[in-house]
């Protein structure tokens, strides 16, 4: 959907942990898209470089900013009370709530 709209794939994504499964990680790796998330499997035996932790902290901060805006929309603009009757209305209601915030 992003590629259809903008004509290219994003360079970096900020996604919840639930979306970072093996299939998604393989897709991101194949398309050279950066995603800052906790690696799957055991922790490495050798410690990671400090730049890794700096990048992770920045990505987590960026993700918190996104989550905060969703919370603001729900709390201030009562976006959680939008109840669509048809699937087409679902996107329209969310877009209206987002537009009212900006």
Image: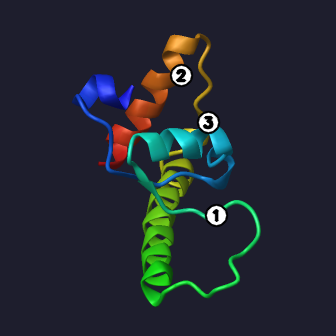
Label 2: which secondary element: helix
Residue most extreme to the right: 42
Q: Earlier in the sequence, mark 3 or mark 2?
A: 3
70 over 93 or under it: above or below: below
The nearer-to-camera label among 1 and 2 is: 1
Sequence-first disc among 1 and 3: 1
> Does 37 sit left or right of 5 as displayed?
right
Q: Which mark is residue 5?
A: none
Indicate the quadrant containing the N terminus: top left, top right, bottom left or bottom right.
Answer: top left
Colour option used: rainbow
SS under mark 3: helix
Q: Residue at x 57, y 46 (%)?
A: 25
- Frontmost of labels 3 and 2 is 2
Residue drawn at (61%, 88%) of the image: 47
Q: Earlier in the sequence, mark 1 or mark 2?
A: 1
Q: Which residue is mark 2?
A: 90
Reply above or below: 10 against 85. Answer: below
Which structural element holds mark 1?
A: loop
Q: Quadrant of residue 65?
A: bottom left
Left or right placement of residue 28 versus residue 8 in this view? right
The dot on residue 39 is 1
Residue at the spot 62% in from the left edge and 13% down from the top edge: 85
Name the side, left or right, on which 57 lies relative to 31: right
| Image x and y of residue 69, in percent | 45, 56
Camera-side residue of 45 and 50: 45
Q: Distance between the Cα atoms at labels 3 and 2?
A: 12 Å
Which one is closest to the eye, mark 1 or mark 3? 1
Q: Which residue is mark 3?
A: 81
Q: Please tell me how crowded label 1 is: few (under 14), some (14-19), or many (20+) other residues with Cα within 10 Å.
A: few
Distance from disc 1 to disc 3, alpha carbons, whole Å, reads 36 Å
């Amino acid at each position: 959907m992003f590629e259809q709209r903008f004509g290219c794939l994003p360079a970096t994504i900020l996604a919840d942990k639930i979306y970072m499964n093996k299939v998604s990680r393989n897709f991101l790796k194949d398309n050279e898209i950066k995603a800052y998330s906790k690696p799957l499997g055991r922790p490495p035996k050798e410690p990671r470089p400090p730049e890794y932790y700096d990048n992770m902290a920045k990505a987590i901060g960026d993700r918190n900013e996104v989550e905060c805006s969703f919370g603001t929309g729900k709390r201030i603009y009562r976006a959680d009370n939008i109840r669509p009757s048809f699937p087409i209305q679902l996107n329209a209601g969310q877009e209206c709530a987002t537009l009212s915030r900006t």
